[in-house]
């Protein structure tokens, strides 16, 4: 039986919205108001998972009949969490640090269906940067202005030019929403994909 109950994306991310648009399912977007601060001794994978669940749960509380999708992504380098840079200088500092190194992304997904069933998954993606010159970093930042992107790059466009490799089970996870697992979860909830 096909599920026709509403789907809600619990996110303020334009990138996640674009990703979900690509699946050609009807959905609404609600911005969850969730404190994203790290708890003491919380590991990056735990943080990403907790926030994905919190975002979905927050929106689910006001929309009990909907299927709600929450997601969160945490970028780490040398066991330190790196958020969105916000400024040109911070983006430059991050890319200088990441140059010729590997960083990890933990991208967590939580889907809560109309019955309250909670499905969760975390994808781990390793990005290996090539050695970047300061001129390349500055040119990249000027062109893409990746100030609202974890890791200071946009993988869906020129960000790929900064890499040696990307290792992941789901290439879409690096953009912020693991679509392969999301499709599986939506099918389990009775939605058609495709």
Image: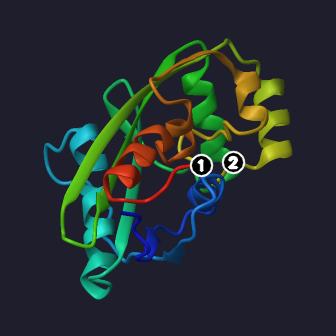
Q: Which residue is outermost to the front?
A: 1
- Residue 18, x across and y down, in percent: 65, 57
Look at 31% across and 51% down and name the residue there. Answer: 188
Using the image, determine if residue 80 lies above or below residue 57.
above
Using the image, determine if residue 137 lies above or below residue 8.
above
Q: How many callouts does the rendering have?
A: 2
Left or right: residue 8 versus residue 13 is left
> Pointer 1: what residue?
149
Q: Which residue is outermost to the bottom?
A: 62
* Any part of residue 37 in sight: no
For mark 2, give the secondary structure: loop
Mark on residue 78? none
Q: Which residue is outermost to the left?
A: 41
* Any part of residue 90 in sight: yes
> Pointer 2: what residue?
146
- Residue 92, x across and y down, in percent: 67, 37
- Residue 109, x across and y down, in percent: 35, 50
* Residue count near mark 1 (Cα–Cα under 10 Å), binned few <14, some 14–19, many ≥20: many
Q: Closer to the camera, 89 or 2? A: 2
């Amino acid at each position: 039986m096909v599920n026709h109950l509403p789907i809600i994306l619990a996110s303020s991310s334009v990138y996640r919205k674009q990703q979900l648009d690509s699946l050609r399912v009807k959905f609404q977007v609600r911005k969850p108001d969730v404190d994203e601060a790290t708890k003491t001794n919380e590991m990056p994978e735990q943080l990403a998972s907790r926030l994905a669940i919190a975002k979905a749960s927050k929106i689910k509380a006001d929309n009990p009949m909907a299927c709600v999708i929450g997601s969160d992504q945490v970028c780490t380098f040398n066991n330190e969490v790196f958020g969105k840079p916000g400024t040109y200088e911070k983006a430059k500092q991050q890319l200088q640090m990441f140059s010729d190194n590997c960083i990890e992304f933990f991208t967590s997904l939580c889907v809560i269906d109309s019955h309250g069933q909670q499905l969760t998954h975390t994808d781990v993606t390793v990005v290996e940067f090539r050695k970047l010159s300061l001129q390349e970093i500055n040119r990249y930042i000027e062109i893409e202005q990746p100030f609202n992107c974890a890791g200071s790059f946009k993988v869906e466009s020129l960000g790929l030019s900064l890499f040696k490799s990307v290792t992941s089970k789901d290439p879409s996870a690096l953009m912020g929403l693991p679509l392969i697992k999301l499709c599986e979860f939506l099918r389990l909830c009775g939605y058609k994909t495709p």
